[in-house]
Amino acid sequence: MSEFRMKDPIYPEFRIYDYDRLSKLMKSYPVNRLRFIKQLGLKAYSGQFPSANHTRYEHSIGTMHLSRQLCKQLYDNTSDLDLKGSIKEYQPTIETAALLHDIGHGPFSHVVDDILEYFGKDHEAITVEIIEKYLADEIKSIDANIDIRDVCSIILGRNLNHAYLNDIIHGHLDVDRMDYLARDAYFTATEYQWRAYSFIQLMRISKIPPRISDEKVEALHKEIEASQIPKREEITEAINRIKDLWTDHVCICNEDGVVHAEMMLITRRTMYENVYYETSSRIAENMISRAIMWMIEQDKTKESLFLNPENFVRLDDFELFALLKNSGGYAEQTVQRIKEGRFFKVILQDKVASMKRLKDAVARKDRDEIMNINIEVAKELETDQERVLLDIIKRKGFERNRVFVQIDDEAKPLEDMSGVIRALINSIEKEMTFGIYVDTEKTQIDDNKLKKVKNVLRGGEGE
């Protein structure tokens, strides 16, 4: 068995086993490209995190490493023989999915996300296209039994064979988050007390029955009996069988596992508030995103550069900067301003809920209306549209009934076992903020203009 030791600051004992087989995939162009995409976008170019220079490649191999560690621990901790066999069977697929889970990220990680969304795509869809089109042979060289469809479905969290496969890479307490929280905290000098290895030791796979009470089943029976819908007997029989069904999930073991989960989710909340939502880097990333749209609108480049996987897979941080610079005009100016640290300024930050028109547009996911608001704000500020950036900051919540705790023979949702988690859920669900960033080198801001901007966001006059 070949072995390659990686020098990684997060995992001192990081070894890649079966390196001879994995190396072909790890050295493939789509994977190696991740060395040239910064994990935290433009944070190293602005604000208080100049050391945030780590890449998507480091994160991807770290996630693969943790997936191997988790598979081993799940096998040791799980008692059901069928599930133990399943873990052994799927381990090569899981590790492959972990390595490739970010293969569809574009330059500076999330900078092009809004561009993709505007044209009806996302980085996950591009991930699948890149894997299917460019990496099939490399994946088969690892293990001929790996099904590429399983690799893709695990990455997307849509595998129908076993629910636990989705939990490992696409869950709330998955190895993806375990790695990026530790890695991002390290490179941004953020203090944290949570450790992935200790948490992994407290995980197993358990069979989880559906969460439906006897009272709910009885109520459904009465509704069906009182209705005139066809096949009432068949539907009633199906409902009676619900309580015999189960799904397999990665579960946290006992009270110690609950404490580790609380620490991880608090760390994640802290990282989002103090690092990921940090204002100066969001301004820089929004400036680049707007410059990309300007290039497309001015026919300096085509949207196919970002939508076609054959073109997309060639894009990285350096290629994007070169493209912007060579496009001249606003795009070139944006690159120069990033290099000189001349960023747009914040003129307004507030909760989305405080601005009715904006709140309604965000709730409807009405991109055209949000763009109209941006245009109207620019008009009130008497400046060009590209000199005003409207940034919607969406808090990522915690979905109920996704994470389970196994104590003795009973499995319960994490939120039922922890007041800390319930408090986090409630606080996140109520929060969504926005920022308006303006090129104050070209635009004069006064109280009267700011009042007009607020009226646009509210959808009318007055407070």
Image: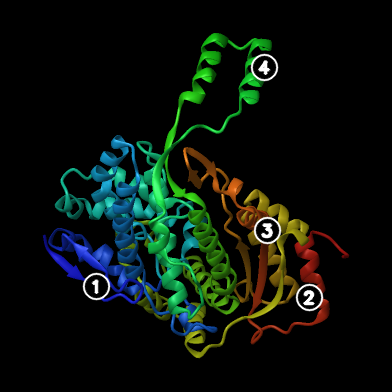
Inter-mark Cα distance, 2 to 1: 53 Å
Q: Circle 1 sits on which residue?
A: 6
Chosen colour scheme? rainbow
Residue 290 locus on image (x, y percent): 53, 70
Residue 315 locus on image (x, y percent): 34, 68
Inter-mark Cα distance, 1 to 4: 61 Å
Q: How many residues crowd mark 4 within 10 Å: few (<14), some (14–19), many (20+)? A: few
Residue at 61% x, 28% y: name it: 213
Residue 347 locus on image (x, y percent): 71, 78
The reply to whether residue 77 is visible in this rendering is yes
Which circle's residue, 2 or 1, is located before the other in the chain? Answer: 1
Question: Is 71 or 188 nearer to us in this picture?
Answer: 71
Residue at 12% x, 63% y: name it: 2
The quarter in which the C terminus is drawn is bottom right
Inter-mark Cα distance, 3 to 1: 39 Å
Q: Circle 3 sits on which residue?
A: 427
Q: Circle 4 sits on which residue?
A: 223
Q: Are marks 2 and 4 in contact (CB under 8 Å)?
A: no
The quarter in which the N terminus is drawn is bottom left
Image height of 255 relative to 296, above or below: above
Question: Is 19 or 330 nearer to us in this picture?
Answer: 19
Inspect the image, locate mark 1, and give the three-letter code of the amino acid beneath it.
Met
> For the residues carrying marks 2 and 1, which lies nearer the camera in this image?
1
Image height of 82 relative to 448, above or below: above
Inspect the image, locate mark 3, and give the three-letter code of the amino acid beneath it.
Ser
In this rendering, would 116 be left or right of 286?
Answer: left
Which circle's residue, 3 or 2, is located before the other in the chain? Answer: 3
Residue 450: image tag? 2
- Which element is circle 3 on? helix
